[in-house]
Image (tube, rainbow, N blue to C red):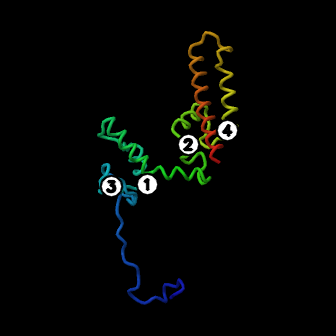
């Protein structure tokens, strides 16, 4: 022990050079410590820096090269394997903004202009405000407003049903 005083160390006790893997992106000289699969279900990996790993992940298509039936089968298999993890929302471990909401709920929240972790009271307020703007009684004969009102109604129904399910479970 030298308590952090380098002069107390003996000769030859310095650290050796550490091997650093560089990013696999051509022309990048950053440290490549983020593995990414070269193809689906392949053990081979690319190693990118964080910036290039993010770029790679944004363009990743898990179902590339599959037709619609194969993609549906793979999705069903993945959902059946990971179905147990959705149970954590039942125990209150998961909040609404961390994956416990369905794709339909997320689209409905997006339509209402709300965050993924919005409370149901916020949903109700946003729905009322937007529905008043495009209600058929306010805009008679406007086809676009009628479509927008129907979309808002559907979004509210999806979110209300999800809230009812959460209250019933909890």
**Nearer to us in this view, 2 or 65:** 65
Q: Disc 3 and disc 4: Cα gap in Å?
A: 43 Å
**Nearer to us in this view, 31 or 84:** 84
- Residue 126 higher or lower than 47, as above or below: above
Contact between labelled residues 2 and 3, with CB atoms less than 8 Å apart: no
First of labels 4, 1 by sequence position: 1
Number of labelled discs? Answer: 4
SS at circle 2: loop
SS at circle 3: strand
The residue that disc 4 covers is 120
Residue extending furthest top? 141
Q: Disc 1 and disc 2: Cα gap in Å?
A: 28 Å
Return the mark for residue 46: 3
Contact between labelled residues 4 and 3, with CB atoms less than 8 Å apart: no
**Nearer to us in this view, 2 or 110:** 110
| Residue 16 sits in quarter | bottom left
The residue that disc 2 covers is 101
Q: Is residue 132 left or right of residue 152?
A: right
Return the mark for residue 50: 1
Q: Disc 4 and disc 1: Cα gap in Å?
A: 36 Å
**Nearer to us in this view, 163 or 135:** 163
| Residue 146 sits in quarter | top right
SS at circle 1: helix
Return the mark for residue 85: none
Q: Disc 3 and disc 1: Cα gap in Å?
A: 12 Å
SS at circle 4: helix
- Residue 151 higher or lower than 117, as above or below: above
Q: Disc 4 and disc 2: Cα gap in Å?
A: 13 Å
């Amino acid at each position: 022990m030298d308590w952090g005083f380098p002069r107390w160390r003996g000769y030859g006790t310095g650290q050796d050079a550490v091997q650093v893997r560089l990013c696999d992106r051509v022309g990048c000289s950053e440290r490549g410590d983020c593995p990414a699969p070269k193809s689906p279900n392949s053990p081979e990996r690319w190693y990118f820096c964080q910036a290039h790993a993010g770029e790679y992940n944004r363009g990743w298509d898990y179902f590339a090269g599959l037709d619609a039936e194969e993609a549906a089968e793979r999705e069903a298999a993945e959902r059946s394997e990971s179905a147990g993890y959705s149970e954590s929302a039942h125990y209150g471990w998961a909040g609404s903004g961390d994956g416990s909401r369905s794709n339909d709920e997320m689209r409905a929240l997006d339509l209402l202009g709300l965050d993924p972790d919005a409370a149901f009271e916020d949903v109700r307020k946003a729905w009322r405000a937007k529905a008043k703007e495009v209600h058929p009684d306010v805009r008679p004969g406007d086809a676009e407003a009628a479509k927008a009102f129907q979309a808002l109604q559907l979004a509210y129904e999806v979110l209300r049903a999800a809230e009812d399910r959460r209250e019933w479970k909890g």
